[in-house]
Image (cartoon, rainbow, N blue to C red):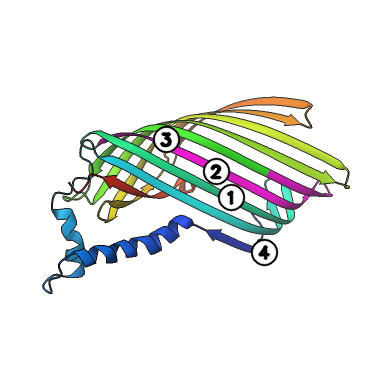
Amino acid sequence: MFNSFKTYRKKSFLIYVFIFLIPALVLAQEKDIKKDSTYTPYELLSTYYNTHFKPFKKRNVYVGFAMSFEDRQLENTNFLVREILDGDQTKYDLNLKGGYFIGNYAMVGINLNYNQDKFTGLVLNEGDTISSNSLSRGFAITPFIRSSVPLTPNERLSFFTELGLTYGKGTSLTRDISNADEINKIYETNNRFRIGISPGITFFAMENFALEIGLNVLGYEINIRERTVNNIEESRRTTQNVDFEINILSLQLGLAYFFGAGK
């Protein structure tokens, strides 16, 4: 999509959490374990999962969180239908999940999402240099049902499948200024409805803390987009889409905690 980048910086808060938080939790646990020279560090860490560890038991509570942040500096870059001469783009995405096990290995829950994308810079459009500013914000709510299947006897590694129904709404405002007095303003709203299946893997890295990886592979989606230009011209577009593919861009990585797993 891009021809060239001057610099590219991508910061993932989630990766920082995995790098710094999990080792700290491991050290904290090791202080509480009575050390025996006959056991290896791996055996000491695995002991917790071999005695009364039931993360997917009925009445357990699940909480998950994921966060990403991205900052890009762009120069002489082709982006969609415009060429960016010099610009800065910042975006972030927040996900919060909660669930309750209504039966062994069966959970109902809800996923909340909030995202923002901001761009400021100079772009080249039809031979004219334009100062462009845009801001997009959106949210999504997804009630879901999850079924988990352990892949190891101690249930430390498991496979899950989620069936979710999503409603999302987003707004965006773009201001293009040329010749210091010509302003073109575009306002858009987008309503999204989706039903989809997302498989994934859960791995318990430390006691009740787990790393989760999910991927959207099958879904049906409806988008209703309304567009207003300079508060005068209005348009409306409705699109429907059925997808059945493995898209690496839909890969989600998060951190979860299972209350009651160690009872």
> Which of disc 2 and disc 3 is earlier in sequence?
2
Q: Which residue is rendered at x = 17% and y = 49% of the image?
A: 53
The label nearer to you, 2 versus 4, is 2
> Which of disc 1 and disc 4 is earlier in sequence?
4
Nearer to the camera, 202 or 243: 202
Q: Is 169 above or below relative to 62? A: above
Nearer to the camera, 224 or 33: 33
In the structure shown, which secondary structural element does the residue marked by tag 4 occupy?
Answer: loop
The crowding category of the residue bearing disc 2, from other C-alpha atoms within 10 Å (few below 14, some 14 to 19, many at least 20), is some
Q: Is residue 85 rendered to the left or right of residue 67? A: right
Q: Which residue is rendered at x = 23% and y = 36% of the image?
A: 59
Q: Which amino acid does the dot numbered 4 rest on?
A: Lys
Q: Please identify the quarter of the rendering in which residue 160 is found.
A: top left
Q: Position of residue 103 (x, y in %)?
A: 22, 33
Q: CA distance from mark 3 to mark 1?
A: 26 Å
- Residue at which label 3 appears: 218
Q: Is 185 above or below relative to 206? A: above
Q: Which amino acid does the dot numbered 3 rest on?
A: Leu
Q: Which residues are magenta?
A: 106-134
- Residue at which label 2 appears: 115
Magenta: main secondary structure: strand
- Residue at which label 4 appears: 6
Residue 116 is covered by the magenta coloring? yes
The crowding category of the residue bearing disc 3, from other C-alpha atoms within 10 Å (few below 14, some 14 to 19, many at least 20), is some
The label nearer to you, 3 versus 1, is 1
Q: CA distance from mark 4 to mark 1?
A: 18 Å
